[in-house]
Image: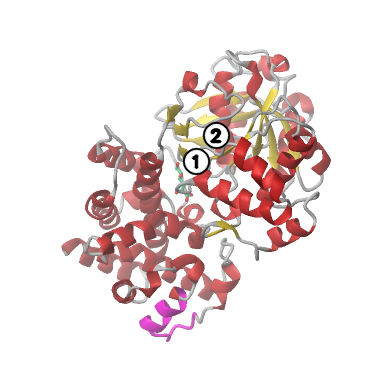
Amino acid sequence: MISPAVPDSRRLSAATLADLPQEVAVPDYDRAGTRIGIVHFGPGAFHRAHQAAYIDALLGSDPDWAISAVSLHSAGVRDALRPQDGLYTLALLGQAPQLRVIGAIREVLCARDEGHAVLERLADPQVRLVTLTITEKGYCLSADGVDASHPDIVRDLATPDVPVSAIGWLAAGLRLRRDRGLAPYTVLSCDNLADNGGRLRRAVLDYTRRLDPELAAWIEREAAFPRSMVDSITPATDDALRAQVAMGLGVADAWPVQREPYTQWVVEDDFRNGRPPLERVGVTLSGDIAGYDRAKLRLLNAPHSALAYLGALMEIETVADAMREPALAGFVERLMREDIAPSLALPQGFDPDAYVDAILARFRNPAIRHLLLQIAWDGSQKLPVRLLGTLADALAAGRSIDRLCLPVAGWMHFVRRQARRDVALVDPLAETLAGIDHSADADAARDVDAFLRLDAVFAPLSADARFADALRRAYATLGDATPAAVARALAGAESR
Ligand code: CS2
């Protein structure tokens, strides 16, 4: 964070923008002439490095889509960016790092203490699109609707006018628009979930049906929830980045973000009441994005999680370091080519080998310090959407699942190791996971079975004896999960 002692003249803002060194790219449009057309929930690093950069490129030719960025709970982004007039720096980490100031965010709000402003913004007729990056857990989903036992949803159903959940805010905004005779906004989820738009639509309808069936019917009739696939590797901001940006800009930036140069955004072309001309800035608009979605979740995110758990057990810090470990890199590559790719129905024209090659090269990018512990967060939410679908498909096709089980077993060992070290897990199920018996003498079958009882993660797969057996074997192969034991297990998986 910037110390309060930094004077405004030394800080990135509309006033200091003109003085930045020439090699820093700055918005090439009149920011004051743009209008807010998008409300975005969850302006974390990913949104600011990805979607906001696309919109920044668009505003010069269409000023109607500037962003109002809304954090649901934490005031951190607002407090960092409001004094900077919404400006922040994006560092692109290629061979020669490039700095670019993004101007797409015109307003930053924190819903927790500016609820009225958020609601009025949602009901602004100029706003036609609401986007979200709130991570898998932020949706409070059940298998086919909303998790009505989630504390935030319980609370929102009781007091829907002052919501705390994203679903609650979406519904409150839509209700106000209907009451004011306005068209609904399109709701676009930009999180790593297969069928993200479909699942969000079902969750919003499930929630609103419990409150106001007529509103639900209106939403069902009038609103659109397109699906999307987002991709760009975005390591969390660290002090090294803050220092690098301050040096490059000559002024301080409270919260710069960084990402690899590669970026992809595929959006289902199903909008009502207009949409930003995203195709002008490199977004792929498609009628059917299920194939892209699956390919990315299964061939990029699943290997990422595999590297995270197995690499963390080997005491490795970053993705690029993990890729320098031949046993781990070899394992992940075989996992991708031999276990995951064969079960994927790919979009037309998609070359799986080239896609895998490109992902492996991105993982190896030496300019990026992407912490395995960052990817390890929220395992209970990520594993089902990343790996368990492939496992189910492999079982259905009668293929071996031995290699696929190793990262899942790696997660279990990782959870146990963190508990033994007394390190808190970042995971919405952290409390439940901590409640599992993590004593060192528990046996493999008992350990695995304790995890398999977590229905939110493993149902319905846990009922399949072939899965439970293979998982117990994989878990046992990892032994005491020390770096040497993991290396032996990887070597064993390699020789099979
Ligand atoms: C990563 C993703 O943190 C994680 O779990 O797997 O954030 C990944 O970097 C992005 O999805 C890449 O687009």
Image quarter of the C terminus: bottom left
Asked if 25 appears above or below 88 in the picture, the reply is above
Q: Is residue 390 visible?
A: yes
Q: Nearer the viewer, residue 71 or 258?
A: 71
Residue positioned most to the left: 495
Which residue is at 78% across, 27% downward? Answer: 8
Badge number at residue 180:
none
Element under disc 1: loop
Image side of residue 421 versus residue 447, left or right:
right
Q: Position of residue 258 (x, y in %)?
A: 53, 36
Question: Residue beneath label 1, please?
Answer: 234
Asked if 373 appears above or below 170 in the picture, the reply is below
Q: Position of residue 18 (x, y in %)?
A: 68, 14
Q: Nearer the viewer, residue 396 or 483?
A: 396
**The magenta stretch spans which residues?**
438-451
- Disc 1 within 8 angstroms of ligand 1 (CB): yes
Q: Is residue 2 visible?
A: no
Calculate the distance from the C-alpha at mark 1 to the C-alpha at mark 2: 7 Å
Q: Amino acid at mark 1?
A: Thr
Q: Nearer the viewer, residue 48 or 192?
A: 192
Q: Position of residue 260 (x, y in %)?
A: 44, 35
Q: Quadrant of residue 180?
A: top right
Asked if 285 appears above or below 172 in the picture, the reply is above
Element under disc 2: helix
Q: What number of labels is visible?
A: 2
Label whose residue precedes the other's in the sequence (1 or 2)? 2
Label pair 1/2, CB-CB below 8 angstroms: yes
Q: Amino acid at mark 2?
A: Ala
Q: Position of residue 187 (x, y in %)?
A: 60, 38
Image side of residue 151 versus residue 445, left or right:
right
Q: Quadrant of residue 31?
A: top right
Question: Residue beneath label 2, please?
Answer: 49
